[in-house]
């Protein structure tokens, strides 16, 4: 006898207040940058986005990682002394300011009820880009001598809410040479949007780097990226806790997926792949039979929205 797997979502009523952190209100002289320099820990904020910056007192003192903000424009000079310039030469949409991050780290949202629908624009800094393009004393030239090495450099984001993991981790590729066709190889140098909405409702985000180029001391590729225009919906609750009962079956799915919800209110669905790409979207009333035969096997996340209710859950396609 086959079992029917039913997921029942309990969702808090909320409305979203759209916000953007673009860092342009942070004051800088032209072609300069800021990071923690005289304390072990410091920070800055833009909108509700709180960005830590860490200073180490060892070896006479140095920036140990986290976030810096910058308006540097040097897209040419190679080496670690040019770690605070975006390869794009400016912020997103020609804005002056952006942030630079170094090493595995985190940022948080100063919002009591968390935020949803997070997105941000990313690119490489000049140091990392030139290292991957040319190779240096530590990092290899991506693609190798033949240009055919399947190299990659990525950053993975993971959301948390009140200390618990949420949604799905999103891997974003800052460079990717794994394609069968060499013309599709790239090292990112323009501002490109990373859709992190499949993380669900979050109050903080951690991230870590991965690279095909590793040595005895870890990743050889310079572990930096630049970010700008972090967009999010700040959750405003009304204090009530109504329930929306939803059935998603079968799960795992073998080519056909059924969605059923309570009430006769139109429901919107978004189906995301594990890397955060939107692969299916639509609307339905009460119930829907959806073909998934055209999709690759694997894990997905489905987000259901009905009025001011929203939830994200894992789905397996086999």
Image: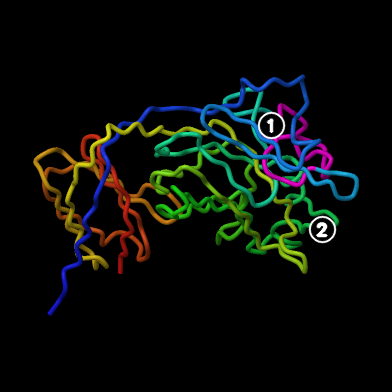
**Figure check: 292 above or below 69:** below
Left or right placement of residue 111 versus residue 223 in this view: left
Q: What residue is shown with label 1?
A: 69
Q: Which residue is situated farthest in the front direction here?
A: 239
When asked about the image quadrant of residue 258, the answer is bottom left
Q: Which mark is residue 239?
A: none
When asked about the image quadrant of residue 253, the answer is bottom left
Instruction: Assess whether residue 28 is covered by the magenta stretch.
Output: no
Measured as percent of width and height from the top left, residue 163 is found at: 47, 52
Q: Residue at x 57, y 25 (%)?
A: 93
Question: The C terminus appears in which quarter of the rendering?
Answer: bottom left
Question: The N terminus appears in which quarter of the rendering?
Answer: bottom left
Near-viewer residue (171 or 129): 171
Element class at badge 2: loop
Q: Which residue is situated farthest in the left direction here?
A: 264
Earlier-in-chain disc, 2 versus 1: 1
Task: Tell me the magenta residue range.
Answer: 63-89
Measured as percent of width and height from the top left, residue 138 is found at: 82, 58
Spatial CA distance of label 2 from label 1 is 26 Å
Instruction: Assess whether residue 66 is covered by the magenta stretch.
Output: yes
Near-viewer residue (240 or 54): 240
Measured as percent of width and height from the top left, residue 161 is found at: 44, 47
Q: What residue is shown with label 2?
A: 138
Element class at badge 1: strand
Q: Residue at x 69, y 59 (%)?
A: 143
Measured as percent of width and height from the top left, residue 104 is found at: 65, 52
């Amino acid at each position: 006898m086959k079992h029917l797997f039913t997921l029942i979502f309990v969702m808090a009523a909320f409305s979203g207040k759209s916000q953007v952190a673009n860092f342009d209100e942070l004051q800088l002289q032209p072609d300069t940058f800021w990071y923690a320099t005289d304390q072990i820990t410091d920070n800055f904020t833009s909108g509700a986005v709180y960005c830590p910056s860490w200073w180490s007192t060892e070896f006479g003192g140095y920036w140990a990682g986290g976030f810096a903000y910058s308006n540097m424009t040097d897209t040419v000079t190679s080496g670690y002394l040019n770690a605070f310039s975006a390869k794009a030469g400016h912020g997103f949409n020609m804005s002056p300011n952006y942030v630079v991050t170094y090493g595995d780290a985190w940022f948080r949202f100063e919002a009591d009820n968390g935020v949803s629908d997070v997105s941000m624009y990313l690119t490489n800094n000049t140091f990392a880009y030139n290292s991957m393009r040319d190779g240096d004393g530590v990092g290899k030239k991506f693609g190798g001598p033949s240009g055919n090495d399947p190299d990659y450099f990525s950053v993975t984001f993971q959301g948390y809410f009140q200390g618990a993991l949420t949604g799905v981790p999103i891997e974003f590729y800052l460079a990717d040479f794994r394609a069968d066709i060499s013309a599709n190889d790239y090292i990112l140098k323009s501002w490109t949007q990373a859709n992190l909405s499949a993380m669900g409702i979050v109050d903080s985000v951690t991230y870590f780097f991965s690279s095909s180029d590793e040595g005895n001391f870890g990743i050889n590729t310079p572990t930096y990226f630049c970010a700008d225009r972090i967009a999010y919906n700040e959750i405003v609750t009304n204090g009530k806790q109504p329930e929306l009962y939803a059935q998603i079956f079968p799960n795992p799915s073998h080519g056909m997926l059924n969605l059923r919800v309570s009430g006769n209110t139109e429901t919107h669905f978004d189906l995301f792949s594990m890397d955060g790409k939107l692969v299916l979207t639509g609307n339905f009333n009460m119930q829907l039979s959806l073909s998934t035969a055209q999709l690759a096997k694997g894990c997905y996340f489905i987000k259901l929205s009905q009025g001011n209710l929203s939830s994200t859950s894992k789905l397996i396609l086999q």
